[in-house]
Structures are given as C-alpha cells and as structure tokens.
Image (cartoon, helix red, strand yellow):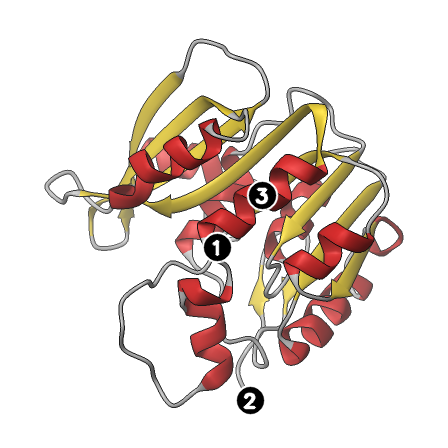
Amino acid sequence: MEKPFKFKKFTIHQDRCAMKIGTDGVLLGAWTSLSNEPSSILDIGAGTGVLSLMLAQRSQAQNIEALEIDVDAYEQCSENFENSPWADRLFCYHASLIEFVEEVEGLFDLIICNPPFYSEDYKTNDNSRDLARFQDAMPFEHLIYAVANLLSEEGIFSVIIPFKEEDNFVDLASKVGLSLKRSLRVKGNPNSEIKRSLLEFSFYDSNIESSEIVIETERHQYTDDYINLTKDFYLKM
C-alpha cells in the first residue's frame, strides 16, 4: 500500500491516482495569485485534488470545485476532500471538460490547471496513467475554450506547461481574449535548461510580470526562493 503524502495541514492519498504529487502541482498551487480574492475556484483535471486543497488552505473561497474524468482519481479526490479541514468548501465532479462547460451554470473567479503534458507518441500499458499524462486527454485548445467560457470577467486563469509550449499557449489564449499577466519559469538547478512555465492570464491587458525560480542548488539542497514559496505546505520546509 502506497503511503499517503502528508502536507502541513492536509494529507493526500494517491494510490489510486495515475499522476502522483509532484513539484509542478505544488509550485502552481503556491504561486497562483489570489489578488482578486476569489469566491469561486475551479480545478480542471484535479487528480489527487492537491491544487484544490492548497487553494482551500490559502484562500477564503467558499466554493471550490474540481473536475476529474478518471473514475479512480475522481473517487480518491473526493475522499481527500472529505478528509480535509475544508470538506464543506470542496466538491469534485466526475465529468469531461466539455460536458462540464455545457452543463455548469455560473462563472469562476479563479481557474487552475496542471494539464497532461506529454504530446509525444508513445503509450504505456497503463490506461489511466496515459489518460493523465498524454495531451490527447485534454488538448490545450479544449482547455482554453473551457476557460474562455467559465472564467468571470475579473477572473484569473493559472496553468503550468512545458516551457517549449509557452509561446504556442500564449498565442492560443490571446485568440479568446486572454492576456498573459504573470509568468514564472522553472529550472531544476542553476545549470539546467528552463523546464516549465507557470502562466497566469486574465481578460485585461496589463504589464507582464516575469520571473524565474531555481528549485535546487544540488540534490535536496533547495533554494531560498523555492523554500519561501512552498514552506506553508511541505512538512520539511
């Protein structure tokens, strides 16, 4: 039995989820801006539910909804919500993104997503892991279409993607009126290439705040920037 992942204020069971807790999700959940004081939040492709739980800890939002298409992940996400201190503010739906867009009423002040990245051609023998990892489960076009339909006028959309996809993603977003507000580029160590981009969009043009973060100086020697960003969550930070 896989051990649960313990954070400072909540615990994640992930033995039934294809995509495990990783640096990407924790970075996104910690970095995402709450400057517009969202009352409603949507987590697209929730997996374990870690992003929703981090935002429940960080915000006063009364309505945090998560969307998960894989049935095992959906059930585990729901259990993680029920066992958290914020169970009354969290709800997980078992549906596809397009179904959700067509059925939901109301808009969200914050939409967050750690989407499946791997657009390469190979597949493993594990269907649920493939579903979580491969872009064909949620093409960027579908994601941006959904956000354009579900985000409130003053809302913020926050996402993490491979750095090599950044220009394409920003271009796709601009076609539905979403402008880049903030970006954070992630390097594993000082000598590695930029691997990930955290991007935040709104329907308003503004000056773009760009920054960079390095996670480790060497193995398990975390930088001050990374510790300061994640210390409210990780037990050992």
Find out whether the residues at labels 1 and 3 contact each other: C-beta distance under 8 Å. no
Per the image, the residue denoted by label 2 is: 1
- Crowding at dot 1, Cα within 10 Å, few <14 / some 14-19 / many 20+, comes out as many
Residue 189, above or below 49:
above
Tell me the kind of residue under disc 3.
Tyr
Mark closest to the chain's N terminus, 2 or 3: 2
Q: Quadrant of residue 167?
A: top left
Q: Nearer the viewer, mark 2 or mark 3?
A: 3
Residue 57, above or below 115:
above
**Tag on residue 115?**
1
- Can you see residue 231? no
Q: Secondary structure at mark 2?
A: loop
Q: Quadrant of residue 192?
A: top left
Q: Is 208 or 150 nearer to us in this picture?
A: 150
Q: Secondary structure at mark 1?
A: loop
User: Rounded to the nearest whole Å, what is the CA distance between mark 1 and mark 3?
Assistant: 14 Å
Q: Is residue 12 left or right of residue 99?
A: left
Q: Quadrant of residue 49?
A: bottom right
Tell me the kind of residue under disc 1.
Pro
Residue drawn 43% across the image and 36% down it: 172
How far from the left and from the top, in percent, is residue 63? 83, 43
User: Rounded to the nearest whole Å, what is the CA distance between mark 2 and mark 3?
Assistant: 39 Å
Mark closest to the chain's N terminus, 2 or 1: 2
Q: Is 34 or 227 nearer to us in this picture?
A: 34
User: Rounded to the nearest whole Å, what is the CA distance between mark 2 and mark 1?
Assistant: 26 Å
Find out whether the residues at labels 2 and 1 contact each other: C-beta distance under 8 Å. no
Residue 218, above or below 121:
above
